Amino acid sequence: MALPAILTMPVWASQQVFEIQRVDYLAPESGGRLGGITAGFPLWKTTVTLGVMSLDQSDAWRVFITALRGAQNKFYGYDAARLLPRAYAGGLPTGFSGTCSGWSQTIDSNGYAILTLAGLPAGLVLKAGDYVDFRWGTYQRSLHRLLESAAAASTGYATASIEPPINSNVVPVGAVAHLDNPACLMKIVTSETSLGAFGRRGPIESGTIVAVQDLVV
């Protein structure tokens, strides 16, 4: 049995940080006001901390890190606390796979990206902090977090602010929006990633995995 082209991060972790990484600079103006400049597009970054675990969990992380070959191979990374919308942590409503039939993005007067999803079951509840990802090509994905709660209307549409905005230079109009198992492509930061020693029980007993999104066209 062959490994998939893109591995998926193991689910188990003692702790995880999963947040947007930005490279921002303050830009003071001559009148005394502070402006801000962002260098590049914001990317997701995760730091996974491993602790006491079972032998199966330990083996899963060890082979995962080995198969990545440092930063050579990509993998699907995600917020392990939000594999599904929070209101449906036990499973999506019957008949809904999590795949949306359409989407669109606008920018409001405050500069926030507003996402409209189509093809949702009427009344579907989305909470602030839920995720949606966009999938296209062979393995490409773009991941976004909802900044406010929303509920699908009887027409199947729901609208909410998201961050980061959808990068129209990367995500094609034909990409498909998903609420099921949202993830993004990531690469390991090898200088900040290490697995701890294993004890007499067999499993490793510590470790830190750091990875950053690789937004592939």
Image (cartoon, rainbow, N blue to C red):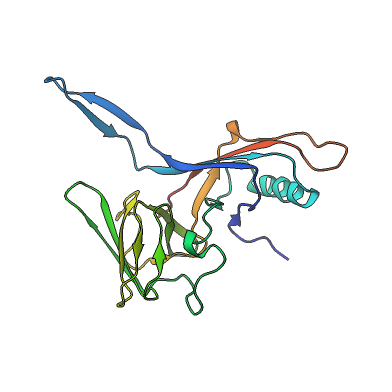
Q: Residue furthest bottom?
A: 95
Q: Position of residue 170 (x, y in %)?
A: 35, 55
Residue occupying the point 35% across, 49% down? 163
Q: Residue 59: x percent and y percent?
A: 76, 49
- Measuring from the top left, give residue 120's x and y in whole percent: 38, 73
Is 68 displayed left or right of 201 in the figure?
Answer: left
Residue 182 vertical position relative to residue 74 in the rendered view, above or below: below
Residue 92 in view here: yes
Quarter placement of the C terminus: bottom left
Q: Residue at x 51, y 78 (%)?
A: 94
Q: Nearer the viewer, residue 180 or 60?
A: 180
Q: Nearer the viewer, residue 64 or 81?
A: 81
In front of the other: 20 or 188 = 20
Which residue occupies the extreme left position in the image?
Answer: 31
Q: In the figure, residue 21 lies in which quadrant?
A: top left
Q: Is residue 85 visible?
A: no
Seen in the picture, residue 152 relative to 149 is either above or below; the reply is below
Quadrant of res 176: bottom left
Q: Quadrant of residue 123?
A: bottom left
* Image coordinates for residue 33, horizontal then vertical, percent: 17, 24
Q: Is residue 29 left or right of residue 212?
A: left
Going 62% across and 35% down the picture, which residue do you hit? 193
How many marks do you count on the picture? Answer: 0
* Image side of residue 41 versus residue 208, left or right: left
Q: Residue at x 45, y 42 (%)?
A: 19
* Quadrant placement of the N terminus: bottom right
